[in-house]
Image (spheres, grey):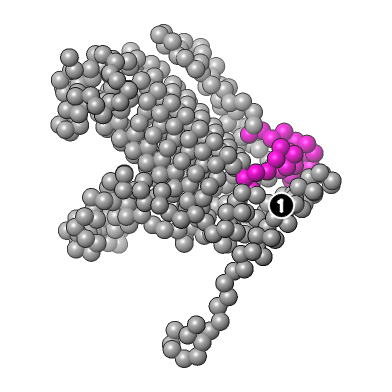
Amino acid sequence: MPKEDGTGSVERSLPNIEVRIGGLLSLERIAQDSTIYDNGRDHVRVMEILCAYVRENAKASEAEISKREIYESETEDSRDSPGMTSEQIAEEYGSDFEDEAKDIDVLKEWAQSLPPPREDIAIALRIIGRRGPDQLRVEAGWGNNTPNAEWVFNKACPHLPDEPGKAALTKEKLETFTKELKARQDTLENYKGYRLDLRMTNLQGADLSTATLAGANLEGVRMAGVDLSKSQLTGAALERARMEGANLFFAQMEGANLSRAQMEGADLGQARMIGVNLSDARMEGADLSDARMEGANLLQARMKGANLWQVKLSSADLRGWTIARTSLRSADLGDYTTLTQDGVNAAWGDGSKRLPPHITRPDHWPDTALANSWDDDPAYDAWIAAGAPPGTPRAP
């Protein structure tokens, strides 16, 4: 191809994908054979090579950027310069840009339209994600000279009763749960074995369903539109991860660190998130229906418009939780000692809610338990249309 100055030409080679894939699969065989025949001497080294390969060939800096991210970047005030006004945004990017940037459905469509990683990157990720029990035991003992060490991420996580019942949980049961959960979190944090290092990588659109990524370091990873359904992310480090529109259905995420993660429009239905750190996380428009989030840290989390159908949040830290226009129907609120009156007043609920003794039921909440599809409820529609003011009339 010609040089930039128009003189002569410069050769630029393209990656030979077939050769790379062959090499990656050979590395997988080395890791497997090493685990079987020589106590996994080469297994972790192979994983280090594969992770480095992904980091070098799929960098977060090369990820596609959504309209929402562009808008927030352009309008953010800094010490050096003020952010752009709505008028300036319209002039620079078009009159519809601001509305589209704020629309969660537009963000989800963008995330789900992202192309998958290049095939060699996808193969490397699949190799990493399908490690077997013997390989995980090797990783657990790596660096601490403990052959056949316990892979702690597979141990059962403490949880509260599946069915809370009519009566609130006793103080003793909550204290026991909190103590057991803290011990479990300490075990995950004190794990001394090998951890996958996929920091600051671009995994947008990747298929990581059922992948084993427990304990992995995924800080700052770009995973918009990724499929992580039924994956193992227990104890993973996901600070500042961007997972807009991701599929995390039934993912195991107990004890994971998702502080400042961005999961707008993500599907977290039935996800297991007991003890997860979601402080300052953004989950606007996310589907958290039937998720387990007991003992979660939701300090300053933003969940406007999220679906919390039957979500379990007992003993969660909800201080500063932004739940305006969030449906709390069939969520169990009976043990939320940190829930504030202002927070409940800004939310929508119905007669199915148990509220802690220090919270007064808002006047705009209907007395009856309404249908599962709250979008069809006249009272809910009126609440949304009126900007969700306190005092919205009760449903008949």
State the image coordinates of residue 280 (x, y, percent, origin top left): 39, 40
Seen at 58% across and 62% down, the residue is 56
**What's drawn in magenta, residue-wise?**
128-153
Residue 167, relative to residue 35: is it above or below? above
Seen at 56% across and 25% down, the residue is 181
On the picture, is 99 further left or further right than 290? left
Residue 33, relative to residue 90: is it above or below? above
Examine the structure image and report whether residue 134 is included in the region drawn in magenta: yes
State the image coordinates of residue 222 (x, y, percent, origin top left): 47, 52
Residue lying at the far front of the rendered structure: 18
Residue lying at the far bottom of the rendered structure: 7
State the image coordinates of residue 125 (x, y, percent, origin top left): 60, 51
State the image coordinates of residue 338 (x, y, percent, origin top left): 37, 24
Residue lying at the far right of the rendered structure: 37
Residue that carries the numbered disc 1 in the rendered image:
28
Under mark 1, the amino acid is Glu
Examine the structure image and report whether residue 105 is included in the region drawn in magenta: no
Seen at 61% across and 26% down, the residue is 156
